[in-house]
Protein backbone atom coordinates (compact mmCIF):
# COMPACT_ATOMS: atom_id res chain seq x y z
CA UNK A 1 0.00 0.00 0.00
CA UNK A 2 1.15 3.49 -0.86
CA UNK A 3 2.42 5.38 2.20
CA UNK A 4 0.47 8.63 2.21
CA UNK A 5 1.82 9.85 5.52
CA UNK A 6 4.11 12.46 4.15
CA UNK A 7 0.71 13.45 2.98
CA UNK A 8 -1.09 11.01 5.29
CA UNK A 9 -4.62 9.96 4.46
CA UNK A 10 -6.15 7.18 6.58
CA UNK A 11 -8.34 4.41 5.22
CA UNK A 12 -11.58 4.35 7.21
CA UNK A 13 -13.06 1.07 8.31
CA UNK A 14 -16.20 -0.31 9.87
CA UNK A 15 -17.43 -1.77 13.13
CA UNK A 16 -18.49 -5.23 14.21
CA UNK A 17 -20.45 -7.21 16.72
CA UNK A 18 -21.49 -10.60 15.30
CA UNK A 19 -24.82 -12.06 16.39
CA UNK A 20 -27.18 -14.26 14.42
CA UNK A 21 -29.55 -12.13 12.39
CA UNK A 22 -27.75 -8.90 13.25
CA UNK A 23 -25.49 -6.72 11.14
CA UNK A 24 -21.82 -7.23 11.92
CA UNK A 25 -21.55 -3.46 11.79
CA UNK A 26 -24.23 -2.68 14.35
CA UNK A 27 -23.84 0.15 16.80
CA UNK A 28 -22.06 -1.68 19.59
CA UNK A 29 -18.68 -1.34 21.16
CA UNK A 30 -16.11 -4.13 21.47
CA UNK A 31 -17.51 -4.90 24.91
CA UNK A 32 -21.07 -5.08 23.58
CA UNK A 33 -22.24 -1.90 25.29
CA UNK A 34 -24.73 0.15 23.30
CA UNK A 35 -23.41 3.36 21.87
CA UNK A 36 -26.53 4.30 19.91
CA UNK A 37 -27.64 7.82 20.90
CA UNK A 38 -30.77 7.46 22.99
CA UNK A 39 -30.39 3.73 23.82
CA UNK A 40 -30.21 3.04 27.52
CA UNK A 41 -27.43 0.96 29.01
CA UNK A 42 -28.38 -1.56 31.71
CA UNK A 43 -28.67 0.11 35.10
CA UNK A 44 -28.98 3.61 33.65
CA UNK A 45 -32.54 4.20 34.77
CA UNK A 46 -31.95 7.89 35.38
CA UNK A 47 -31.09 8.43 31.72
CA UNK A 48 -34.27 6.58 30.73
CA UNK A 49 -36.50 9.36 31.96
CA UNK A 50 -36.41 8.97 35.76
CA UNK A 51 -35.54 12.14 37.65
CA UNK A 52 -31.86 12.54 38.28
CA UNK A 53 -30.61 12.76 41.82
CA UNK A 54 -31.42 16.25 43.13
CA UNK A 55 -34.52 16.78 40.92
CA UNK A 56 -35.29 17.32 37.30
CA UNK A 57 -32.68 18.39 34.79
CA UNK A 58 -32.26 22.11 34.61
CA UNK A 59 -33.23 24.09 31.52
CA UNK A 60 -29.58 24.72 30.59
CA UNK A 61 -28.74 21.03 30.88
CA UNK A 62 -31.72 20.04 28.76
CA UNK A 63 -30.77 22.58 26.10
CA UNK A 64 -27.24 21.22 26.14
CA UNK A 65 -28.50 17.68 25.63
CA UNK A 66 -30.69 18.80 22.76
CA UNK A 67 -27.76 20.56 21.13
CA UNK A 68 -25.57 17.49 21.56
CA UNK A 69 -28.28 15.34 20.01
CA UNK A 70 -28.58 17.71 17.07
CA UNK A 71 -24.86 17.27 16.45
CA UNK A 72 -24.63 13.54 17.08
CA UNK A 73 -27.68 12.45 15.07
CA UNK A 74 -26.28 13.56 11.68
CA UNK A 75 -22.92 12.00 12.58
CA UNK A 76 -24.66 8.71 13.37
CA UNK A 77 -26.56 8.84 10.09
CA UNK A 78 -23.36 9.51 8.14
CA UNK A 79 -21.71 6.63 9.98
CA UNK A 80 -24.52 4.28 8.99
CA UNK A 81 -24.36 5.47 5.40
CA UNK A 82 -20.65 4.93 4.91
CA UNK A 83 -20.65 1.62 6.80
CA UNK A 84 -23.61 0.10 4.92
CA UNK A 85 -25.04 -2.30 7.53
CA UNK A 86 -26.34 -5.61 6.19
CA UNK A 87 -28.56 -8.45 7.31
CA UNK A 88 -28.49 -12.04 6.20
CA UNK A 89 -25.64 -14.02 4.70
CA UNK A 90 -24.54 -15.80 1.55
CA UNK A 91 -23.99 -19.48 2.35
CA UNK A 92 -20.71 -21.17 1.54
CA UNK A 93 -20.82 -24.58 -0.11
CA UNK A 94 -19.06 -27.50 1.54
CA UNK A 95 -15.53 -28.05 0.34
CA UNK A 96 -11.87 -27.27 1.04
CA UNK A 97 -11.06 -24.25 3.18
CA UNK A 98 -8.04 -21.99 3.42
CA UNK A 99 -5.15 -23.51 5.37
CA UNK A 100 -3.19 -21.26 7.76
CA UNK A 101 -0.02 -23.33 7.33
CA UNK A 102 0.02 -22.83 3.57
CA UNK A 103 -0.49 -19.11 4.03
CA UNK A 104 2.40 -19.04 6.50
CA UNK A 105 4.72 -20.78 4.02
CA UNK A 106 3.86 -18.33 1.24
CA UNK A 107 4.44 -15.33 3.49
CA UNK A 108 7.77 -16.67 4.70
CA UNK A 109 9.00 -17.17 1.14
CA UNK A 110 7.79 -13.76 -0.03
CA UNK A 111 9.01 -11.78 2.98
CA UNK A 112 12.17 -13.82 3.49
CA UNK A 113 15.36 -14.00 1.52
CA UNK A 114 18.38 -11.75 1.53
CA UNK A 115 17.05 -9.24 -0.99
CA UNK A 116 13.84 -7.20 -0.92
CA UNK A 117 11.30 -7.61 -3.71
CA UNK A 118 11.59 -4.19 -5.35
CA UNK A 119 12.77 -2.92 -8.76
CA UNK A 120 16.19 -2.21 -7.31
CA UNK A 121 16.62 -5.97 -7.11
CA UNK A 122 15.14 -7.25 -10.41
CA UNK A 123 16.38 -10.78 -9.82
CA UNK A 124 14.34 -11.03 -6.63
CA UNK A 125 11.23 -9.70 -8.37
CA UNK A 126 11.67 -12.29 -11.12
CA UNK A 127 12.05 -15.01 -8.50
CA UNK A 128 8.81 -13.95 -6.83
CA UNK A 129 6.99 -13.75 -10.17
CA UNK A 130 8.12 -17.30 -10.98
CA UNK A 131 6.95 -18.51 -7.58
CA UNK A 132 3.50 -17.00 -8.19
CA UNK A 133 3.34 -18.42 -11.72
CA UNK A 134 4.18 -21.93 -10.51
CA UNK A 135 1.58 -21.75 -7.72
CA UNK A 136 -1.10 -20.54 -10.16
CA UNK A 137 -0.24 -23.35 -12.58
CA UNK A 138 -0.25 -25.98 -9.82
CA UNK A 139 -3.75 -24.79 -8.86
CA UNK A 140 -4.98 -25.48 -12.39
CA UNK A 141 -5.18 -21.89 -13.56
CA UNK A 142 -4.74 -20.87 -17.18
CA UNK A 143 -1.60 -18.82 -16.65
CA UNK A 144 -0.03 -16.01 -18.61
CA UNK A 145 2.51 -13.26 -18.03
CA UNK A 146 1.84 -9.63 -18.94
CA UNK A 147 5.19 -7.90 -19.51
CA UNK A 148 5.57 -4.14 -19.28
CA UNK A 149 8.18 -1.48 -18.58
CA UNK A 150 8.27 0.71 -15.47
CA UNK A 151 11.04 3.15 -14.65
CA UNK A 152 13.12 1.74 -17.47
CA UNK A 153 12.99 -1.79 -15.98
CA UNK A 154 11.26 -4.93 -17.24
CA UNK A 155 8.30 -5.92 -15.05
CA UNK A 156 5.65 -8.63 -15.09
CA UNK A 157 2.08 -9.09 -13.99
CA UNK A 158 1.23 -12.76 -13.48
CA UNK A 159 -2.33 -13.74 -14.40
CA UNK A 160 -4.37 -16.92 -13.80
CA UNK A 161 -7.89 -17.54 -15.08
CA UNK A 162 -10.39 -19.98 -13.62
CA UNK A 163 -13.87 -20.99 -14.70
CA UNK A 164 -15.50 -19.82 -17.91
CA UNK A 165 -13.56 -18.38 -20.83
CA UNK A 166 -16.32 -15.91 -21.65
CA UNK A 167 -18.67 -13.61 -19.84
CA UNK A 168 -18.13 -10.87 -17.27
CA UNK A 169 -15.14 -11.63 -15.09
CA UNK A 170 -14.42 -11.09 -11.41
CA UNK A 171 -10.88 -9.79 -10.98
CA UNK A 172 -8.94 -10.33 -7.75
CA UNK A 173 -5.49 -8.78 -7.46
CA UNK A 174 -2.60 -8.16 -5.06
CA UNK A 175 0.75 -6.45 -5.53
CA UNK A 176 3.92 -8.44 -4.85
CA UNK A 177 6.47 -5.61 -4.72
CA UNK A 178 7.52 -4.00 -1.44
CA UNK A 179 8.16 -0.50 -0.16
CA UNK A 180 11.87 0.23 0.13
CA UNK A 181 14.28 -2.43 1.35
CA UNK A 182 11.82 -3.88 3.87
CA UNK A 183 10.43 -7.38 4.51
CA UNK A 184 6.83 -6.36 3.80
CA UNK A 185 5.12 -9.34 5.41
CA UNK A 186 1.76 -7.63 5.84
CA UNK A 187 2.43 -5.15 3.02
CA UNK A 188 1.86 -7.08 0.88
CA UNK A 189 3.15 -10.65 1.18
CA UNK A 190 -0.09 -11.31 3.08
CA UNK A 191 -2.22 -10.23 0.10
CA UNK A 192 -0.22 -12.32 -2.36
CA UNK A 193 -0.35 -15.35 -0.05
CA UNK A 194 -4.12 -14.91 0.10
CA UNK A 195 -4.24 -14.73 -3.71
CA UNK A 196 -2.26 -17.98 -4.05
CA UNK A 197 -4.47 -19.77 -1.54
CA UNK A 198 -7.54 -18.45 -3.33
CA UNK A 199 -6.15 -19.95 -6.56
CA UNK A 200 -5.72 -23.34 -4.89
CA UNK A 201 -9.29 -23.31 -3.60
CA UNK A 202 -10.78 -22.21 -6.93
CA UNK A 203 -8.88 -25.03 -8.62
CA UNK A 204 -10.14 -27.62 -6.14
CA UNK A 205 -13.72 -26.38 -5.81
CA UNK A 206 -14.31 -25.04 -9.31
CA UNK A 207 -16.28 -21.88 -10.04
CA UNK A 208 -19.19 -20.85 -12.24
CA UNK A 209 -18.49 -17.82 -14.38
CA UNK A 210 -15.12 -16.23 -15.11
CA UNK A 211 -12.50 -15.34 -12.49
CA UNK A 212 -9.15 -13.68 -13.13
CA UNK A 213 -6.41 -13.53 -10.49
CA UNK A 214 -3.55 -11.08 -10.95
CA UNK A 215 -0.29 -10.54 -9.04
CA UNK A 216 1.07 -7.07 -9.84
CA UNK A 217 4.49 -5.57 -9.65
CA UNK A 218 5.18 -1.82 -9.13
CA UNK A 219 2.40 -0.69 -6.82
CA UNK A 220 4.70 1.10 -4.40
CA UNK A 221 6.44 4.47 -4.95
CA UNK A 222 7.79 5.81 -7.23
CA UNK A 223 5.15 4.13 -9.39
CA UNK A 224 2.07 4.68 -7.26
CA UNK A 225 -0.49 6.90 -8.96
CA UNK A 226 1.16 6.58 -12.39
CA UNK A 227 0.41 4.64 -15.56
CA UNK A 228 3.38 2.40 -14.64
CA UNK A 229 1.56 0.72 -11.76
CA UNK A 230 1.16 -2.95 -12.60
CA UNK A 231 -2.57 -2.73 -11.93
CA UNK A 232 -2.87 0.31 -14.22
CA UNK A 233 -1.26 -1.72 -17.00
CA UNK A 234 -3.60 -4.65 -16.36
CA UNK A 235 -6.78 -2.56 -16.14
CA UNK A 236 -5.87 -0.61 -19.29
CA UNK A 237 -5.23 -3.90 -21.09
CA UNK A 238 -8.66 -5.21 -20.15
CA UNK A 239 -10.27 -2.00 -21.35
CA UNK A 240 -8.35 -2.04 -24.63
CA UNK A 241 -9.43 -5.65 -25.18
CA UNK A 242 -13.06 -4.71 -24.45
CA UNK A 243 -13.22 -7.20 -21.60
CA UNK A 244 -16.36 -7.24 -19.51
CA UNK A 245 -15.48 -6.83 -15.84
CA UNK A 246 -18.13 -7.49 -13.24
CA UNK A 247 -16.01 -6.14 -10.39
CA UNK A 248 -12.52 -6.09 -8.89
CA UNK A 249 -11.36 -7.04 -5.38
CA UNK A 250 -7.95 -5.80 -4.21
CA UNK A 251 -6.19 -7.76 -1.45
CA UNK A 252 -4.08 -5.17 0.37
CA UNK A 253 -2.59 -6.12 3.75
CA UNK A 254 -4.79 -8.89 5.20
CA UNK A 255 -2.61 -10.38 7.94
CA UNK A 256 -2.37 -8.17 11.03
CA UNK A 257 -5.00 -8.54 13.77
CA UNK A 258 -4.96 -7.30 17.34
CA UNK A 259 -7.22 -6.83 20.35
CA UNK A 260 -5.48 -3.54 21.13
CA UNK A 261 -6.92 -0.13 20.25
CA UNK A 262 -6.64 -0.16 16.51
CA UNK A 263 -7.07 3.18 14.82
CA UNK A 264 -6.05 6.79 14.80
CA UNK A 265 -8.77 8.38 12.70
CA UNK A 266 -11.27 11.00 13.92
CA UNK A 267 -13.70 9.81 11.24
CA UNK A 268 -13.68 6.29 12.63
CA UNK A 269 -14.28 7.50 16.15
CA UNK A 270 -17.08 9.83 15.09
CA UNK A 271 -18.86 7.04 13.21
CA UNK A 272 -18.66 4.61 16.17
CA UNK A 273 -16.18 2.20 14.59
CA UNK A 274 -14.60 -0.44 16.83
CA UNK A 275 -11.68 0.23 19.12
CA UNK A 276 -9.99 -3.09 18.36
CA UNK A 277 -8.35 -4.59 15.31
CA UNK A 278 -9.88 -8.03 14.92
CA UNK A 279 -11.93 -7.54 11.77
CA UNK A 280 -11.37 -7.09 8.05
CA UNK A 281 -12.44 -3.98 6.17
CA UNK A 282 -14.05 -3.65 2.73
CA UNK A 283 -13.28 -0.18 1.39
CA UNK A 284 -14.70 1.55 -1.65
CA UNK A 285 -16.62 4.49 -3.06
CA UNK A 286 -20.30 5.22 -2.57
CA UNK A 287 -21.06 3.61 -5.95
CA UNK A 288 -19.31 0.41 -4.75
CA UNK A 289 -21.61 0.02 -1.74
CA UNK A 290 -23.62 -2.80 -3.31
CA UNK A 291 -20.43 -4.77 -3.94
CA UNK A 292 -19.26 -4.10 -0.39
CA UNK A 293 -22.54 -5.36 1.02
CA UNK A 294 -22.35 -8.55 -1.05
CA UNK A 295 -18.83 -9.22 0.19
CA UNK A 296 -19.86 -8.68 3.81
CA UNK A 297 -22.74 -11.13 3.43
CA UNK A 298 -20.32 -13.62 1.91
CA UNK A 299 -18.00 -13.24 4.90
CA UNK A 300 -20.90 -13.87 7.27
CA UNK A 301 -21.63 -17.13 5.45
CA UNK A 302 -18.02 -18.30 5.40
CA UNK A 303 -16.15 -17.27 8.55
CA UNK A 304 -16.43 -16.02 12.11
CA UNK A 305 -14.12 -13.14 11.22
CA UNK A 306 -16.26 -9.99 11.03
CA UNK A 307 -16.20 -7.86 7.89
CA UNK A 308 -16.88 -4.13 8.10
CA UNK A 309 -17.04 -1.56 5.34
CA UNK A 310 -16.58 2.02 4.28
CA UNK A 311 -18.39 3.36 1.20
CA UNK A 312 -17.76 7.03 0.68
CA UNK A 313 -15.40 9.75 -0.54
CA UNK A 314 -11.97 8.52 -1.58
CA UNK A 315 -10.32 11.70 -0.31
CA UNK A 316 -10.01 10.16 3.16
CA UNK A 317 -7.58 7.54 1.82
CA UNK A 318 -9.85 4.93 0.27
CA UNK A 319 -7.88 5.04 -2.98
CA UNK A 320 -4.44 4.03 -1.75
CA UNK A 321 -4.04 0.74 -3.60
CA UNK A 322 -4.66 -1.06 -6.87
CA UNK A 323 -8.47 -0.79 -6.93
CA UNK A 324 -8.07 2.85 -7.99
CA UNK A 325 -6.99 1.80 -11.50
CA UNK A 326 -10.18 -0.20 -12.08
CA UNK A 327 -12.28 2.75 -10.93
CA UNK A 328 -10.50 4.79 -13.58
CA UNK A 329 -11.73 2.38 -16.24
CA UNK A 330 -15.32 2.63 -15.01
CA UNK A 331 -15.62 -0.62 -13.01
CA UNK A 332 -16.75 -1.30 -9.48
CA UNK A 333 -13.88 -2.22 -7.16
CA UNK A 334 -13.13 -2.48 -3.45
CA UNK A 335 -10.09 -3.02 -1.27
CA UNK A 336 -10.12 -5.82 1.32
CA UNK A 337 -7.67 -4.77 4.03
CA UNK A 338 -6.69 -5.04 7.69
CA UNK A 339 -6.56 -1.19 7.57
CA UNK A 340 -2.78 -0.92 7.27
CA UNK A 341 -1.13 1.88 9.22
CA UNK A 342 -4.35 2.56 11.16
CA UNK A 343 -3.78 -0.75 12.92
CA UNK A 344 -0.34 -2.18 12.26
CA UNK A 345 2.55 -0.47 14.09
CA UNK A 346 4.99 -2.36 11.82
CA UNK A 347 3.69 -0.71 8.64
CA UNK A 348 6.62 0.23 6.36
CA UNK A 349 9.16 -0.76 9.01
CA UNK A 350 11.79 -3.45 9.41
CA UNK A 351 9.49 -5.09 11.95
CA UNK A 352 6.87 -6.02 9.33
CA UNK A 353 7.93 -9.67 9.50
CA UNK A 354 6.07 -13.00 9.08
CA UNK A 355 5.98 -13.68 12.81
CA UNK A 356 3.74 -10.67 13.42
CA UNK A 357 0.86 -12.01 11.30
CA UNK A 358 -2.17 -14.04 12.35
CA UNK A 359 -2.43 -16.82 9.77
CA UNK A 360 -5.63 -18.25 11.26
CA UNK A 361 -7.38 -14.91 10.75
CA UNK A 362 -5.85 -14.66 7.27
CA UNK A 363 -7.46 -18.01 6.45
CA UNK A 364 -10.81 -16.51 7.46
CA UNK A 365 -10.19 -13.62 5.06
CA UNK A 366 -9.46 -16.02 2.19
CA UNK A 367 -12.57 -18.06 2.93
CA UNK A 368 -14.69 -14.92 2.93
CA UNK A 369 -13.21 -13.68 -0.35
CA UNK A 370 -13.62 -17.14 -1.91
CA UNK A 371 -17.30 -17.22 -0.97
CA UNK A 372 -17.77 -13.71 -2.36
CA UNK A 373 -15.99 -14.55 -5.62
CA UNK A 374 -18.05 -17.69 -6.16
CA UNK A 375 -21.34 -15.83 -5.61
CA UNK A 376 -20.30 -12.83 -7.72
CA UNK A 377 -18.99 -14.94 -10.61
CA UNK A 378 -22.16 -17.04 -10.71
CA UNK A 379 -24.46 -14.02 -11.21
Image: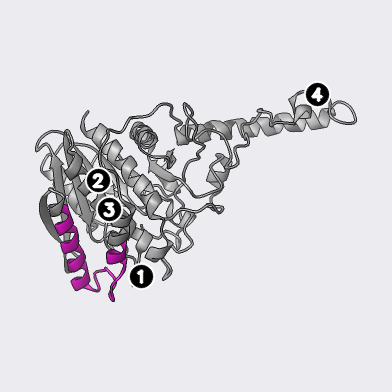
Task: Give the spatial CA distance, label 2 vs label 1.
Answer: 25 Å
Q: Residue under circle 2?
A: 172
Residue 332 visible in the picture:
no
Say left or right for 23 vs 193: right
Q: Earlier in the sequence, mark 4 or mark 1?
A: 4
> What residue is rendered at 34% in x and 32% in y?
294
Residue neighbourhood size for the residue with mark 3, other residues' Cα within 10 Å, grouped as few (<14), some (14–19), many (≥20): many
Q: Quadrant of the C terminus?
A: top left
Q: Does the residue at mark 3 contact the one at mark 4 (Cβ under 8 Å)?
A: no
Q: Earlier in the sequence, mark 4 or mark 2?
A: 4
Q: Is residue 83 above or below residue 155?
A: above
Q: Nearer the viewer, residue 361 or 235?
A: 361
Give the magenta range.
107-136
Q: Residue 68 — which label?
A: none
Which structural element holds mark 4? loop
Q: Earlier in the sequence, mark 3 or mark 4?
A: 4
Note whether residue 109 is visible. Answer: yes
Alpha carbon distance from label 4 to label 2: 55 Å
State yes or no: discs 1 and 3 in contact (Cβ < 8 Å): no
Real-space Cα distance between discs 3 and 4?
Answer: 56 Å
* Mark 3–mark 2 CB contact (< 8 Å): yes
The percent position of residue 305, horizontal first and vertical second, equals 42, 42
Residue at 66% from the left image edge and 28% from the top image edge: 38
Q: Where residue 86 appears, x then y in whole percent?
A: 43, 29
Viewed as shown, does residue 246 lie left or right of 318?
left
Q: Which residue is label 1 attached to?
A: 182
Under circle 3, the secondary element is strand
Q: Secondary structure at mark 2?
A: strand
Q: Magenta stretch: dominant SS? A: helix
Please name the residue that numbered disc 4 is placed on.
Answer: 50
Amino acid sequence: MYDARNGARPVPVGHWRHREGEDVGDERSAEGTSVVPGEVAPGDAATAGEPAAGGRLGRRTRLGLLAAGAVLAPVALVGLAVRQPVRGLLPMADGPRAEPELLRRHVEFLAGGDLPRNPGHPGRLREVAEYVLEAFAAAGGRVEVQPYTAGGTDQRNVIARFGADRGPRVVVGAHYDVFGDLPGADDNASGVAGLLELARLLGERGVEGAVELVAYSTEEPPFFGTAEMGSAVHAAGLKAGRARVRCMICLEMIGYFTDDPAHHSPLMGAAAYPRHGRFIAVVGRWRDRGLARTIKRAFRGATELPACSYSGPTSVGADLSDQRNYWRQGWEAVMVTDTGHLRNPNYHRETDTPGTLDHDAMAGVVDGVLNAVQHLAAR
